[in-house]
Amino acid sequence: MKYRTMGKLGIQTSAFGLGCMRFNGAASGDSVIDEQKAISLIRKAIDGGVTYLDTAYVYLNKTSETVLGKALRDGYRDKVTIATKMPFEAVYDRASMEALLKEELEKLQTDHIDFYLMHGINREKWEGFKAIGAPAFFDDMKKAGRIRYKCFSFHGPYDQFEYILNDWDWDMVQIQYNFMDINNQAGTRGLELAGGKGIPVVIMEGLLGGRLAKAPDNVQALYDAFPVKRSAVEWAFRWLCNHPEVSVVLSGCNEKEQIEENLRIFDTVAPGIMGAEELKLMDDVRAAYLSRTKIGCTGCRYCMPCPNGVNIPGVFSAWNQVSLYNTDPKTDWGFSQIKRNDHGADKCIACGACEAACPQHLNIIDGLQRAWGELNAD
């Protein structure tokens, strides 16, 4: 496992950070998470050298922190740093922030949180956090030792990222970034802005919700033609770790084989590792993906549940899958399940709740109409 220094903080961290948002559900279907399997995966990652674990209050129907806390028993807590988050929607004054932090500490079975993030903020939410006294609260909790570093995660346009980053003395920032998102959200400019200020950057959605993990044929042809053979996942993570501003790349794993593969990959990467030919390859891969991608949905599910029962990320996933891999919608299992369960885009009444919640700022209503039309075309 390669380790990196986290900017001005000066602390060491594993380049691979385990994301705790995408664990599988229990086989019985009675729980949103298979606890024993998740605990086994978390400990396998730590035993392999992972020191950074990322969760949030809202992940997996508010169960992720609890399971992580159980996994960190038996001395594992002392081996890692924990990042978790305060959602703006869950707090409204000092007392509610204190209650939320207390609940999170209890779930995580720890007396402090290493990286405490204001969750998914944009400029509006940042102003809201300031209005209820969150900056003073974070400062006080840092002095009290209940949190170590004050941070934020971000989904939004670059100008808002620049404003928020420059508006307070942040210790760390978490952004969505991958070789497809160089000009989206904070993008490369945001990464370099934070890095220039010595603020460590943690990367989420490095595989764009898994869409970059399996290469469509036009992308695979580019990978196959390159002299050095690597998997699509390795190319994506290698590209991210090439950036010196990146401290940690988060990856959610559902199987032990994924943990093992990530441990192998992150033992081979370093800043500046990619030469001109490799960087040119990734530019070509980006163009190939863009030629077939219908919509930039990462499957984060912030838009869910839809009040009218539409499986929004499911519809978009099927739409992208069919386009990327040139398959017949009738043979797509996800699309067939959506129709069978009556969760199709034909249920959409254009209420707009999804668009207000989408961190990618997608035109969901229009996208659903177009997706449903194409997927059901004769």
Image (spheres, helix red, strand yellow):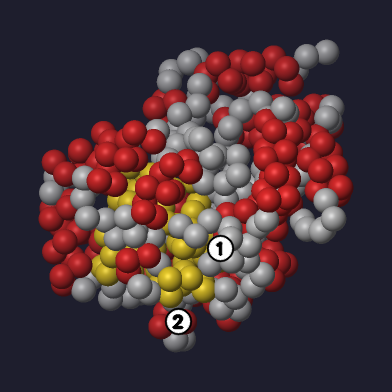
The image quarter containing residue 27 is bottom right
Q: Which tag, 2 or 1, sits closer to the chain's start? A: 2
Which x, y percent locates residue 196?
A: 36, 54
- Disc 1 residue type (three-letter): Pro
Q: Can see residue 256?
A: no
State the residue at coordinates (50%, 26%): 362
The residue beneath circle 2 is 79
Side (left or right) of 173 relative to 177: left
* Numbered circles on residues, count: 2
Which x, y percent locates residue 119?
A: 35, 48
The N terminus, quarter of image: bottom right
Which x, y percent locates residue 342?
A: 65, 26
Side (left or right) of 49 relative to 340: left
Question: Considering depth in this image, is 305 or 131 the residue closer to the camera?
Answer: 131
Q: Is residue 116 above or below residue 367?
A: below
Which x, y percent locates residue 217?
A: 84, 39
The residue beneath circle 1 is 271
Q: Residue furthest front?
A: 276
Question: Considering depth in this image, is 110 or 158 the residue closer to the camera?
Answer: 158
